[in-house]
Structures are given as C-alpha cells and as structure tokens.
Amino acid sequence: MIKLRNRNVGPALAPPFEGHGPDGAGRATFAAGCFWGVEAAFRQVHGVLQTAAGYTGGHVPDPTYGRVCRHRTGHAEAVEVWFDPAQVSYAELLEVFWRIHNPTTRNRQGLDFGSQYRSAIFYHDAGQQETAIASRDAQQQSRKRQIVTQITPASAFYRAEEYHQRYLEKHGHFGRAATIR
C-alpha cells in the first residue's frame, strides 16, 4: 500500500534537490507526460524526500524548455525522485508511475503530445532495470493495449527552469496533480 501525504495542508516541505540528493537516498527517474503533474504525484508519496522536474534521454547538453518543446533535443520531460528505501521501495514507486499516466499511448498523455511526453523509466542500476521490466510485464497482463513505455539506462538529467519546479503547488493545485487510476 502506498501512503500519500495529506494533500490539503499546502506544499510539502522538502525542496527540489540540488546536486546528488540526500545521503543514503535512492534515486528514480520517470517520464509520464507533463512533468508538472508527475512531480506533484510523486511528492505525495510517503518516503519521497525530494523531487525535481527536468529533462533526460536526449542528445543535446543543457536543454531548455523551448528547445525540448520544439523537438530539437530528444529529451523527455521527466522527474527525478529521491526516496528513502526504508519507507518506500522502488517497486512501490513503479506502482505510482503506472497509475498516474497511460503507458499505452506513444508520445502522448491527454492533450499533450510529442516525444517529450513519452512514457519512460530511466533505470540507475541493474536492480532497477530488472524491477522495472518485471513491473511492466505484470502491468501488461491487466491491459488490453500494448504498453509502449521505454525502459532505458538513465543518462544526464538536466533540471528544468525554476518556474517548472513544484509548478502545481505554486499555483494552488495540491490535490489535482495527476490522474491516479
């Protein structure tokens, strides 16, 4: 069972991380559409310590939002999640990932379309890769349409511009982060 923070009390206290994250924390990177809702959804999970919206999986160093949206970098809008493995497991984070988006639509989530909105899991080690593949295969059993989520090694993660960080919280949308099925 995933424990969610109380969504009615205002912004969570942990700021987006700088550098390499908290000591002893695990790191996970997910792309599931617009990073605003994805970040907000993961920030609600008990055991998530810090998050950051950003760009990964592309071929251009230091991408900007404008370049990513013009499909000139190959990056996905993604969220890096730093978590306490004693409070939440990587497998539990994957459960959240599958619930907050539609992994059967290629390069599209809701009204957002383009390769920057692709569904992807960027794994940081062999254990995460194995867990992600097993999780995807289990999810596929309960779906009629083929899951198109990419499972690929993590690459450089570029933090998005500051106005994208905790965007929904800054604009008063604490409880409407993402569609959780």
Image (tube, helix red, strand yellow):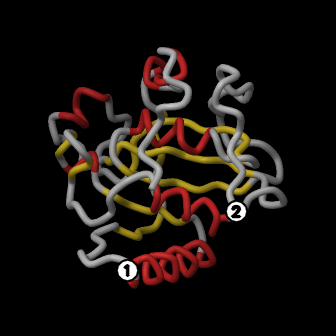
Q: Which mark is residue 27?
A: none
Q: Quadrant of the C terminus?
A: bottom left
Residue 116's spot in the image, x, y percent?
26, 46
The residue mark sitting in front, 2 or 1, is 2
Residue 173's spot in the image, x, y percent?
49, 22
Residue where numbered disc 1 is placed: 140
Residue where numbered disc 2 is placed: 1
At a point 51% along the width and 74% down the height, the residue shown is: 132
Seen in the image, is 132 located left or right of residue 102? right
Q: Amino acid at mark 2?
A: Met
Disc 1 packing (10 Å; few <14; some 14–19; many ≥20):
some
Q: Secondary structure at mark 1?
A: helix
- Residue closest to the eye, 18 or 139: 139
The answer to which quarter of the image holds residue 55 is top left
Image: 27 above or below 152? above
Q: Secondary structure at mark 2?
A: loop
Numbered label tally: 2
Tell whether label 1 touches label 2 (CB within 8 Å).
Answer: no
- Residue closest to the eye, 134 or 28: 134
Seen in the image, is 150 located left or right of residue 115? right
Image: 137 above or below 165? below
Image: 18 above or below 25? above
- Residue closest to the eye, 68 or 130: 130
Q: Quadrant of the N terminus?
A: bottom right
At a point 38% along the width and 60% down the height, the residue shown is: 120
At a point 19% along the width and 39% down the height, the residue shown is: 111
Q: Amino acid at mark 1?
A: Gln
Residue 22's spot in the image, x, y percent?
77, 43
Which comes sooner in the sequence, label 2 or label 1? 2
